[in-house]
Image: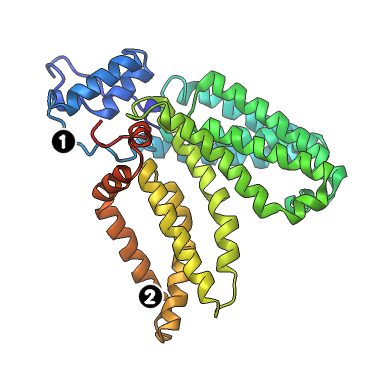
Amino acid sequence: MQQTAPAPAAGPGDGPIPGPLAGSTAFLREGVARGIITGDQALALDRLARDGGAGSDEPRDDERLRFVTGFADIFVTLGLGLFLGSATVFGHEYLGAVLGNALVAIFAWGLAEFFTRRRRMALPSIVLLLAFGEAGFATLAAALGLAEGGGSWPDLIGPRPTRALPLAGATFGTVLLVAAHYRRFAVPITVAAGAAAGIGLAFALMLAAAPDFVQASIPGLLCAAGLAVFALAMRFDLADPARITRRTDIAFWLHLLAAPLLVHPVLSELAGAGEADRGATLGVLAIVLALAVVALAIDRRALLVSGLVYAGIAFGRLVRDAGVTGATVPASLLLLGAFILALSAGWHPLRARVLRALPRPWAARLPHPIGA
């Protein structure tokens, strides 16, 4: 979340900013976020750095996302967790579910006015957004009677139309709250949070209209939702191929949301096949390899990370098939670790090969295109 991080200020005796720092992606993105330079000016400076004008030797196609700008972020986040957690307990005890959750949402918004809008702290901004969204949803849900009778949330989202409509109302209200938060604070993860609330709203409405269809089609619906979020993420990515504006941070969080929605329904079905189903095991590995190619093409590791658990399960089955029964877990973890390390070490040259294999107009539009 680069744009929320304060840039280091030069002291009286620091002299001019050195070339490598002036040409760095992080420095340029902070300048755009603060309104010091425009996006076009940042792109021009970035091209100058890559042409040798600033001598920058930073890798050009790594995902850059700063969660922590310093230990102060961790310190503040610890305080936020203690304060908001205690406020939730006391609010529920003395004010009830509706007013107690509403109080936590108000606290989260008020704290964001200082730590997000004024201090521009990365990790606290993420925590405050998530706390505000969760407290806002819990307030609306309690007000609409969703938590009455001690029912668990899985029961509330089952095929019960009488509960689905209040759930739709709570999720719709959460979408509006998250949109208001983004308009005020512009925290990049807010777009992904809003997308998640929108998916919840769509599912709630479908549950109210056709509960049996939803129950029978959950894997397909999750994949459809994942594809929609992935398309939205790519829209932000393609709008910022150099990854120097807020769009790249928004795209990262959207990819992180899309990944499990796309990966889990497909791979869980294959991974859940019988132990002797070698075809399903090989299918899991084939899908993971396909995800690796997509991840290389778009320079996003989130899709691949989501499939690593299933790749580990598949490696374990292959190890057992090979007759190594006494050390299945360490052997499968060894293979999985070797796969991750090999891919990490060869990420840049492998990505170059993938991009060169694509049609040139497509490759030229992707983030950090080869030769751009």
In the image, residue 17 sits, relative to residue 227, either above or below, namely above
Colour logic: rainbow
Between the C-alphas of marks 2 and 1, the distance is 38 Å
Query: In this image, 74 relative to 8: left or right?
Result: right
- Most extreme residue toward the front is 359
In the image, residue 205 sits, relative to residue 50, either above or below, namely below
In the image, residue 314 sits, relative to residue 368, either above or below, namely below
Q: Tell me the SS state at disc 2.
A: helix
Query: In this image, 337 relative to 317: left or right?
Result: left
Q: Residue at x 49, y 35 (%)?
A: 233
Q: Quadrant of the C terminus?
A: top left
Q: Residue at x 66, y 39 (%)?
A: 199
Q: Residue at x 12, y 29 (%)?
A: 55
Q: Quadrant of the N terminus?
A: top left
- Most extreme residue toward the right is 162
Q: Residue at x 76, y 41 (%)?
A: 204
Image spot of residue 284 (x, y percent): 49, 64
Res 194 seen here? yes
Query: In this image, 162 relative to 192: left or right?
Result: right
Image spot of residue 98 (x, y percent): 76, 34
Q: Which residue is mark 2?
A: 330
Task: State the count of labels.
Answer: 2
Q: Tell me the SS state at disc 1.
A: loop
Q: Residues within 10 Å of mark 1 (few under 14, many from 20)?
A: few
Res 95 seen here? no
Q: Which residue is mark 1?
A: 57
Query: In this image, 40 relative to 137: left or right?
Result: left
Image spot of residue 258 (x, y percent): 53, 44
Type of amino acid under label 2: Pro
Q: Quadrant of residue 195?
A: top right
Q: Quadrant of residue 84?
A: top right
Q: Quadrant of residue 167?
A: top right
